[in-house]
C-alpha cells in the first residue's frame, strides 16, 4: 500500500469512494451530494488517498482548512475512512497529513 496526494487523475475515484461510504449520511462534511461534485483538492482542502497493490483507492482523508481572519485558522476532518480493516491505512494517512513533503 502507498499514500498519495489526491491527483486530478484520481479525483473521480475519490468522489465515488466518498459517496459510496458517506453519501447517505449528512455529517457536515459535504451537506449535499452536489457539494462533492464540485470538490477539488487545493491548499485549503488537502486530500490524501491510500492505494492498494491492485492500484485501487482503499482509504482517504480530506481536511477542511478555514481562515477566520483575525480569529485564526481552523482545520477539521472532512472525511477519514478506510474500507479495509488494516491500521496501516490510517497510519499512512496520518503520516501524510503531518508530512510537510506531501503537499497539494
Image (spheres, grey):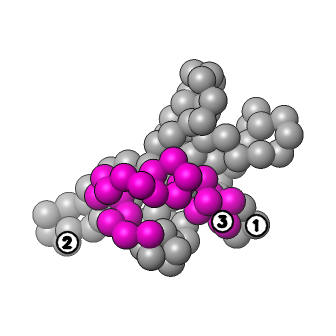
Residue 82 lies, with reference to residue 65, above or below; the image says above
Nearest the camera: 62 or 25? 25
Residue extent of the magenta highlight:
11-33
Q: Which mark is residue 69?
A: 2
Please identify, in this view, whether the residue under mark 1 or under mark 2 is nearer the observer.
Answer: 1
How far, Cα to Cα, is label 1 from label 2?
33 Å
Residue carrying label 1: 9
- Residue at 61% x, 41% y is 59
| Label 2 Cα neighbours within 10 Å, binned few <14 / some 14-19 / many ≥20 | few
Residue lying at the far front of the rendered structure: 24
Residue at (66% x, 65% y) in the render: 11
**Crowding at mark 1 (Cα within 10 Å: few <14, some 14-19, many 20+):** few
45 vs 59, left or right, is: left
**Count of marks overlaid on the render:** 3
| Helix, strand or loop under label 3 | helix
Marks 3 and 2, how far apart in space?
30 Å
Marks 3 and 2, the one that precedes in the sequence: 3
Q: Nearer the viewer, mark 3 or mark 2?
A: 3
Where 38 falls versus 93 (above or below)?
Answer: below
Left or right: 96 as drawn, with respect to 4: left
For the C terminus, which image quadrant?
bottom right
- Which residue is depicted at the point 84% across and 35% down? 53
Residue 86, given in percent of the width and then of the height, sits at: 62, 22
**At which x and y percent is residue 4?**
69, 48
- Secondary structure of the residue carrying tag 2 is helix
- Residue at 44% from the left image edge and 69% from the top image edge: 33
Q: CA distance from mark 3 to mark 1?
A: 6 Å
Residue 52, x across and y down, in percent: 77, 37
Amino acid at each position: 500500500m502507498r499514500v498519495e496526494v489526491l491527483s486530478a487523475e484520481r479525483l473521480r475515484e475519490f468522489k465515488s469512494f466518498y459517496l459510496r461510504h458517506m453519501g447517505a449520511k449528512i455529517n457536515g462534511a459535504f451537506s449535499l451530494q452536489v457539494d462533492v461534485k464540485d470538490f477539488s483538492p487545493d491548499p485549503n482542502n488537502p486530500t490524501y488517498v491510500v492505494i492498494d497493490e491492485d492500484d485501487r483507492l482503499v482509504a482517504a482523508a480530506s481536511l477542511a482548512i478555514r481562515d477566520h481572519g483575525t480569529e485564526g485558522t481552523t482545520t477539521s476532518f472532512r472525511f477519514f475512512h478506510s474500507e479495509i480493516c488494516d491500521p496501516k491505512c490510517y497510519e499512512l494517512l496520518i503520516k501524510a497529513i503531518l508530512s510537510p513533503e506531501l503537499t497539494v
